Amino acid sequence: MKGLGLRGWWSGRRGATTLLLGLGALAVLLVLGMSLGAVRIGPGELWDALSQEGTLAHQVIWDIRLPRLLAAALVGASLAVSGALLQAVTRNSLADPHLLGISAGAALASAIMLVRGVALPPPAAMAVAVAGGLLGAGGIYLAAWQGATSPVRITLAGVGISSLFLALTLAVLATSRLFAFASLTFIGGSLFGRGWDDVNAAWPFAVAGLGLSWLMAQPLNILILGDDVAAELGLKVERTRWAGLALAAVLGGTAVKVAGLVGFVGLVIPHVARFLVGQDYRQVLPASALVGAAFIMACDIVARNVIAPAEVPMGVVSAAVGVPFFLYLLRRAR
């Protein structure tokens, strides 16, 4: 289909400005994230800390903080783009992977592995979580199918699937002897203890999901015009809708396996992206990825510093921003 290429993704002043500001914000947050923590490392000491092996500062940055920051960026970008995809597929501004069952399917698969102590290699464990997200997406699609799907039925089916899978996830965690802190960080969302193994397992799924999502930008621009109009323009509506759901599941499953249940990111960030760059999904999707990555990096920095040396679940911080925004969207919804 014409328009699937890269041209136009960052055309215009708004897109270019958002790109530069987003990259600048990521750079600033990377420096802050490596500097702040129980062990403070001044910005002027970062280069020496990174280059001088064997020092405490080098170990803190290279083994703990840097992989955690990269994991935060992957989680934020994945959740934000997953939310943008779902909002296009359902034509519902309140759609979100956490609310529509995508995250819940991945959470159930991850909780079973966590409780059963399944010792899979990190890439295999990531694939199982992604499969759980795809299971949630498949359940939504089947529940919404009546010869065809509709945005309203997908939304309602997603809420039902989410409630079911979250209840099963809580049942799995509650009936286990799992250490309470592990359950809390999983349910509340946290990057505690995440390292290079998690980054290496997550980035192939995240990069593939983000890349394929951006290739769908123009079909999504057509889909949001309505099913009838999209069909008249030659778009395969059901194929596009299923592809969007599947990609949202891959991205949502990746994020859940790394960080647990982090809510409201997929709801809030796509709206911020549209405010910055407009309604064109060729720019909304990459803007969502940039803003989402910066948002979760900032949330994680706050989460691990607000009561340092202890930390609060990162999902608490994201919810503190997301809940007021969600209520604002509800008041605007017609």
Image (tube, grey):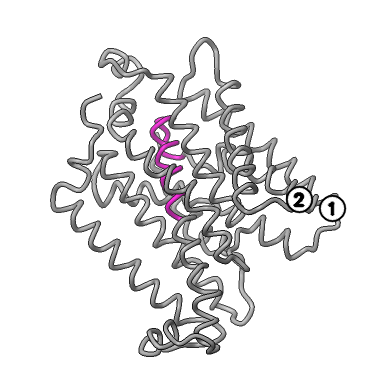
User: Tag 2's secondary structure?
Assistant: loop
Disc on the earlier residue, 1 or 2: 2
Q: Residue at x 55, y 24 (%)?
A: 141
In percent of width and height, residue 82 lies at 45, 42
Q: Callout 1, which amino acid?
A: Ser
Task: Report the front residue among 233 and 227.
Answer: 233
Q: Quarter of the image containing the N terminus?
A: top left
Magenta run includes residue 93: yes
Mark 1: give few (<14), some (14-19) or many (20+) Cα within 10 Å.
some
In percent of width and height, residue 103 lies at 58, 43
Magenta run includes residue 160: no
User: Tag 1's secondary structure?
Assistant: loop
**Magenta segment, which residues?**
76-94
Is 160 left, or right, of 322 in this rendering?
Answer: right
Disc 1 from disc 2: Cα separation: 14 Å
Asked where in the image residue 222 lies, by quadrant, the reply is: top left
Query: As displayed, is residue 205 above or below residue 314?
Result: above
In percent of width and height, residue 300 lies at 51, 67
Q: Callout 2, which amino acid?
A: Val
CB atoms of marks 1 and 2 within 8 Å? no
Residue 176's disc number: 1
Task: Report the front residue among 59 and 180.
Answer: 59
The residue labelled by disc 2 is 118
Asked where in the image residue 32 lies, by quadrant, the reply is: bottom left
Q: Residue at x 38, y 38 (%)?
A: 213
